[in-house]
Image (cartoon, helix red, strand yellow):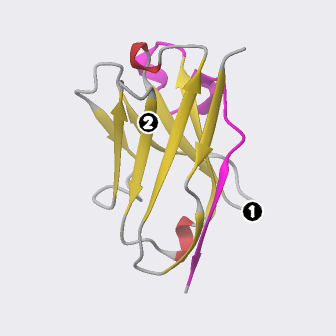
Amino acid sequence: QVQLVESGGGLVQTGGSLRLSCAASRFTLSSYTMGWFRQAPGKEREFVAAIRWSGDTTYYADSVKGRFTISRDNAKNTVSLQMNSLKPEDTAVYYCARNLGDIRTVYQQAGYVNWGQGTQVTVSS
């Protein structure tokens, strides 16, 4: 069974940093565009960042551009999200997922499958 497992969440103060990791099992992550989404309490899940299977193109939500960096380590079969200059509004459960292969859907959660269980990120003010 294809599985994605996120890790690295936690509690951090405003301005701090966290690095999230998404590990894949039973499929080769390097063959797919991968994305990170987040869901804050009472809000819908929203796009955060994505990276193409080739690793040469990345996509970011305007709210995280310049602060977050998505990367992939194909040797370890993982995708990471480095989050710097964190703000209280970044507080959410963060999920990784695999894109179905249509680059037109890279910003839409409907274009993704194999969602992980999520990892909680809390930024205190």
1 or 2: mark nearer the eye: 2
> In percent of the image, x 55 and y 13: which residue is there?
27
Give the image location of residue 70, x and y in percent: 36, 43
**Residue sitting at the far bottom:** 125
Which of the pair 114/41 is nearer the observer?
114
**Dot 1 lies on which element?**
loop
Name the residue: 54% across, 15% down. 100
Q: From the image, tell me which residue sits under label 2.
A: 79
Percent position (x, y) of residue 116? Answer: 67, 35
| Residue shown at the point (69%, 49%) measured from the top left | 44
For the residue pair 1 and 61, the one nearer the viewer reads as 1
Residue linked to disc 1 = 41
> Would you say 91 lies left or right of 17 here?
right
Q: CA distance from mark 1 to mark 2?
A: 25 Å
Quadrant containing the N terminus is: top right
Q: Residue 61 or 117: which is nearer the viewer?
A: 117
User: Mark 2 falls on what kind of element?
Assistant: strand
